Amino acid sequence: MLFLVLVLYCWHPDSIKNIRALFKYPYIFYAIRAIGRVMLKWGVERRLEYIEFRLFWEGGVNRSDLVDTFGVSVPQASKDLTHYQERAPQNAVYDKSARRYKAGPEFRPVFLDPDPDAYLMRLRSMAEGFAETGSNWLAVPPDMDVSLTLRRKVDTEVLRSVLAALREEKSIDLHYQSMSHDRPDPAWRRITPHAFGFDGLRWHVRGWCHETAQFKDFLLSRILGYGQFDEPGVGSAQDRLWQETFNIIIIPHPDLSASQQMVVAKDYNMVDGRALLTVRYAMLFYVLKRLGLLEGARSRDPRIQHIVAANEHEVAVALERAQREFNEADVASGAAPL
C-alpha cells in the first residue's frame, strides 16, 4: 500500500517537486528500501536460493529448471541466472556443451547455509511418498529407500477440528478408543487441546481431559470422531509437565574403544564428548524410549547401544517425577506411556 501511494505521489505532474520533498522524510526511503527487500526475498531471492541449492547439491542448474519449478518466463529465468552470477560470480560456470550452469571450483554459498539434515529430509519425504521429484527442489535424487513403518491413519476432519479447537481456545468432544483394560470400547471424552507431540512414529494431541481432570496425550489415529465445541478447561500454563524441561546429558557408551567413542561423539554432534538434550517432562518417556535410555542402557551391548546418559540418576528422578505428577494416566490409550 505504501509503495502504491508513493508511486501515485510521484506520478503527479509536480512529481519532481514531490520527489525532492520526500528527501525531507528519510524514513520514507527506509520504508521503500525495506519493501524492496521483502519483495526480493519472496520473489527473486527465493529463486536465487533455488539456483544455489541446485548448484551446491546437484552440481548444476539451467533456465528450464526455474521455468518448471516457479512458472516464470524464460526471459525472467535468464535474468535470475544473471542476477545470481552478479551476486556470486565464482559459483556458477556456464557449460556450453551441457547448456547449463555448473558449480565452480571455488563455490561459496551466498544465499544458503547448506544443511545436510535439511537435504536428507527432502530425500526422506520423497522415499516416504510425501513429495515428488522436483517439488522439493531435487531433480536427480540418488536411488534410496527408508526403513518404513506402518503409517498411522489420521482422519482429516478430526485433525482439522482439533486444530480449530486449539486455535480458538475451546474444548471439544472426541470419540476415542482407549487400549486400557477398563475402557474396552470407544467413549466420548471432552478435552481442551493445547499442543501436539510426535514420538518419532506417531502424533498425539495434548490437552486437559475434563473427565479425569488431568493433562493427557491422545493419539490422533485413535480419535474416531468429534463433536461440539464448548468452553475451555484448564489452560496450558498449568500443564507443568509440558512447560518445564529437563536436560539429558548424552555420552558415548563407556565400554566402547576410544576410537569408537570418538566416532559416536562425532555422530551425535557432541562437544567435549557429550551432548545436551533439553526435553519437556511430558516428552521425557518418549525420548528415553527412542534412544534406548529407559533403563539398563550401560548393561547393554555397546555395539548396539552406542550412547548412555551421563546423569542416569537425575534422569531416573525426572522420569519418576513425570510419572508421579501424571498420576494414573490412561497408559494404553496411546495417551501416555507412563
Image: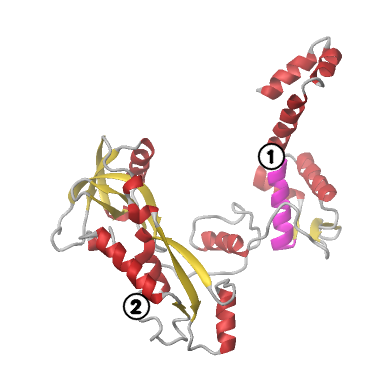
Answer with the quarter of the image where residue 10 lies.
top right
- Where is residue 261? Give x, y as percent: 55, 83
- Residue 295: assigned label: 2
- Work out whether 233 lies above or below 265: above
- Work out whether 18 lies above or below 54: above
Residue that appears at 75% across and 15% down: 9
- Asked whether residue 150 is in view, the answer is no
Q: Quadrant of the N terminus?
A: top right
Q: Nearer the viewer, residue 1 or 298?
A: 298
Residue 181 shown in magenta: no
Q: Is residue 222 left or right of residue 250?
A: left
- Asked whether residue 6 is in view, the answer is yes
Task: Determine crowd level at label 1: few under 14, some 14-19, many 20+ residues with C-alpha closer than 10 A.
Answer: few
Answer with the quarter of the image where residue 163 lies.
top left
Q: Is residue 148 left or right of residue 100?
A: left
Q: Which residue is mark 1?
A: 43
Q: Main secondary structure of the magenta part?
A: helix
- Work out whether 72 lies above or below 282: above
- Residue 220: assigned label: none
Q: Residue furthest left?
A: 182
Q: Specify the segment rendered in magenta.
A: 42-59
- Where is residue 110? Give x, y as percent: 75, 53
Residue that appears at 45% across and 83% down: 304
Task: Determine crowd level at label 2: few under 14, some 14-19, many 20+ residues with C-alpha closer than 10 A.
Answer: some
Type of amino acid under label 1: Gly
